Image (cartoon, helix red, strand yellow):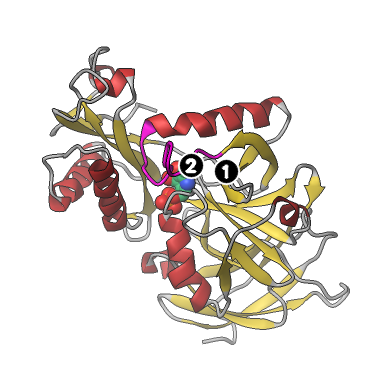
Amino acid sequence: MADFKIWMNGRLVPGDQAVLPVNSAAVFYATNVFEGLRAYWNAQDGELYGFRLQEHFARLRESMKMMRFTVPYSDVDLYEAVREVLKGNDVQEDVHMHLVAYVLGTGLDATTPTGLYINPRRRPRAPEGGLRACVSSWTRTSDNAIPIRLKSGSNYQNGRLATLQAKADGYDAPILLNRGGTVAEGTGATFFMVRRGTLLTPPLTADILESITRITLLEQVIPDLGLEVVERDIARTELYVADEAFFCGSGYEITPITSIDKFPLGAGAASIQGDVLYSDDFCFTVLCAPVESEESYTVANARIGYAAPDGRWEIAAFVNNLFEEEYRVYAFDSSLFSGVVAGVYGKPRTYGVTASFRFGAGYD
Ligand SMILES: Cc1ncc(COP(=O)(O)O)c(C=O)c1O
């Protein structure tokens, strides 16, 4: 499979030609700001759909402002550049793109000249199985030192150290605490957990990136599901008694966490069954109930989605406590619901379970 070409300052070039001078601030100090963009291929429409590009462009501008450098491209130019990189590479699959603004000048105080590149990469969907997380002994960099709100490549060394430690210790991913000792986030994802039926996430002042996926969940998906979320500081020990937890981000999408410091989240296995009660092009309502032979339980980390025409499982939304409730589910992007088969993938507690829901057959 050929590598995608990289869009660099207005031209599509092969990867080995997308190079930067070693004495540039971009290379030496990692003086850049960037965004990780997702575009999803919808085979039925024959279209790629970008996820919240406008919000990513706005955040890129905020990072540039904080770094005191400018990029001579308007948001429309950025849209066109993204379109060009996708069209020029004839992309017909899900892709992740790094949109990077960098400084070519030399020295620590260089703010100009600036350049821009977009690097599209194949990146698989978030793993289904969930992650074994640990609390890192590395502290999340603080807003007055190396602010993580500022999305610069140089800031990611903090997450890199934490990731290397987590992997060396046999975990999949770290959870970073901030200087105040409360939960910040993952290395490239924000953090949510459920405790006693309440969905919790750290506030924006907890040394986290202002995640676009987080805000999508808070403002759109969670209210649409009839759920509530509390933004508050989370203590380390609350992690160990969480019922459920997940990371979210453009790259991570919604990734369940199955254990933290080897404490399993929740307990026991469960099964679910359900029927789609109503569907139209853009949303569906499911009625979920425990399978008869099972004890009552709540299902953790359930994902509602549909089987795409090419057989892949497309996740549309994350839901909690699927238990004798009706949920009306909307996609982040209405295009997700042009599929014909709806389903629920449940990742209850530490064990997986799958059930599916079908449109049609007696239902509208
Ligand atoms: C440090 C950090 N936190 C959180 C996120 C999630 O942010 P978003 O949902 O905007 O991708 C990312 C991903 O870019 C990140 O790098």
Q: Is mark 1 within 8 Å of ligand 1?
A: no
Which residue occupies 70% across, 35% down? 171
Residue type highlighted by circle 1: Arg
The reply to whether residue 43 is in sight is yes
The answer to which quarter of the image holds residue 101 is top left
The main secondary structure of the magenta stretch is: loop
User: x and y percent of residue 115 in the render?
Assistant: 18, 31
Q: Are marks 2 and 1 in contact (CB under 8 Å)?
A: yes
Magenta highlight on residue 150: yes
Look at mark 2 in the image and give the residue it sits on: 142
228 shown above or below 151: below
SS label for mark 1: loop
The answer to which quarter of the image holds residue 215 is bottom left
Q: Is residue 125 left or right of residue 39?
A: right
User: Callout 2: 10 Å neighbours few (<14), some, many (20+)?
Assistant: some
In depth, the one of 108 and 42 nearer the eye is: 108
- Which stretch is magenta? 140-153
Which residue occupies 39% across, 42% down? 96
User: x and y percent of residue 123 in the render?
Assistant: 46, 39
The quadrant of the rendering that contains the N terminus is: top left
In depth, the one of 272 and 126 nearer the eye is: 126
Magenta highlight on residue 64: no
- Residue 235 disc label: none
Which residue occupies 29% across, 32% down? 32
The answer to which quarter of the image holds residue 269 is bottom right
- Residue 179 disc label: 1
